[in-house]
Amino acid sequence: MSTDEAHPSLALDETVHQRVRLGILAMLSEASECTFTTVREELELTDGNLSRHLRVLEDAGLVEIRKGYDGRRPCTWLALTRPGRKALRAELAALQRLVDRLRGIQPEDA
Amino acid sequence: MTIEDPEQTLREVERLKARSRRRAHGGAWVPAAVLAALVLLSTVLYRSAPPTAHWNSIGIVQFPYWAGLPAEQLSPPVSYLYWLVGLPAAFAVIAWWYRRRARQTGFRVAWRLFAAVGLGALLVLVVLLAVPTEPPADPYAAHIDVGLRWGSGFATPLIAVAASLVALAWVERAPMLAAAGGWLALLAWWQGATRYGQLPYWLYRLFDGGQPIGLGGQTDLPVPGMLALMCLPLLVWVVLAAVRSRAARG
């Protein structure tokens, strides 16, 4: 790695890198849609906490929120957008580069 | 910053993704099994005469191959109804199952795309085969034509099933399932484009100990065996996926 190359940590996206938001994106990346309740239970969050993070992700265009019904019960479905999928991929790649750097592995050797 | 932070984050994310993947796609074997059952059950649409009898009774095999394979059918209208009712009914069952699973797991896969591809392929087949064509000048000559008929290979509902399997593989992110669908499509197309049981010359040479022959040969495999051969990779995938899913739950 050349010394003038930017440090991988600079490639981390603040919106995506936050622990809970990264978890939300990771879960949503594995299905076309996922319920609010499922994400909340898996990440052990409160309704308010999850809503706050979802608002950040929705404002950034990374997640779509759709309100619907499951039978008669109201249900909120969450889905990853195309930019959201791209952002998650970029974030994981940046994290991997960072790990390699901290281990002293050159990218071309990895 | 220590190495543990990003490394631990990556590990956590991978764990979360793997867990979500299992929950979202762990049931993919069910729709695949329904389609496999539909193909295997279609064996009841054929006469049980051995293929050699078929070989000697050119003219009985009717085109389009509504039963699926270019072999003697018990009744072409029954074959037609089997697929035109059976495939949508199979998709209705699969749709019901996907809805139920989404309620249980909280994850939804894009099964509508998979159903649309399967039903769309069947509709295209029905529409294309309904197009009136000029009758051949010599119907007998048309029957004994042993050349490769590319278009005829697609004139079977088995192609719609194969297309469904590839679409299912896409939505369920299962590349090996796409390969199983491709295998089914290849055999279905080959049978329709040549004739029932026809082997390509290179395969015939392989079975025949490398004897030089230019025209290929024919297998004596009866229809149930041929359908089982077409579904073999699919069945293997279904069993492995079901075992994996059960192990993950346990």
Image (cartoon, rainbow, N blue to C red):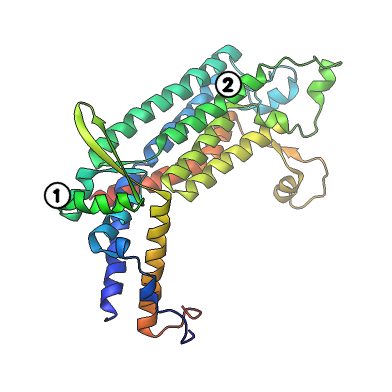
Which tag is nearer the camera, tag 2 or tag 1? 1
The answer to whether residue A20 is left or right of residue A87 is left
Q: Tell me the kind of residue under disc 2.
A: Tyr
The answer to whether residue B93 is left or right of residue A2 is left
Residue for badge 1: A48
Q: Is residue B14 above or below residue A51?
A: below
Q: Quadrant of the N terminus of chain B?
A: bottom left
The picture places residue B238, in percent across and down from the top left corner, at 41, 43
Residue B220 visible at all: no
Q: Residue at x 84, y 21 (%)?
A: B141
Q: Tell me the kind of residue under disc 1.
A: Gly
Q: Residue at x 45, y 31 (%)?
A: B115
Q: Residue at x 32, y 56 (%)?
A: A26
- Mark 2 surroundings: few (<14), some (14-19) or many (≥20) residues within 10 A: many
**In the structure shown, which secondary structural element does the residue marked by tag 1 occupy?**
helix
The answer to whether residue B101 is left or right of residue B194 is left
Same chain? Circles 2 and 1:
no
Q: Nearer the viewer, residue B52 or B201?
A: B201
- Mark 1 surroundings: few (<14), some (14-19) or many (≥20) residues within 10 A: few
Q: Is residue B237 above or below residue B82?
A: below
- Residue B46's disc is 2
Quarter holding residue B236: top left
The picture places residue B18, in percent across and down from the top left corner, at 32, 56
The chain identifier of the residue carrying mark 2 reads B
Residue B56 visible at all: yes
Q: Nearer the viewer, residue B113 or B194?
A: B113
Q: CA distance from mark 2 to mark 1?
A: 62 Å
- Assess whether mark 1 and mark 2 are in contact (beta carbons under 8 angstroms): no
The picture places residue A106, in percent across and down from the top left corner, at 46, 83
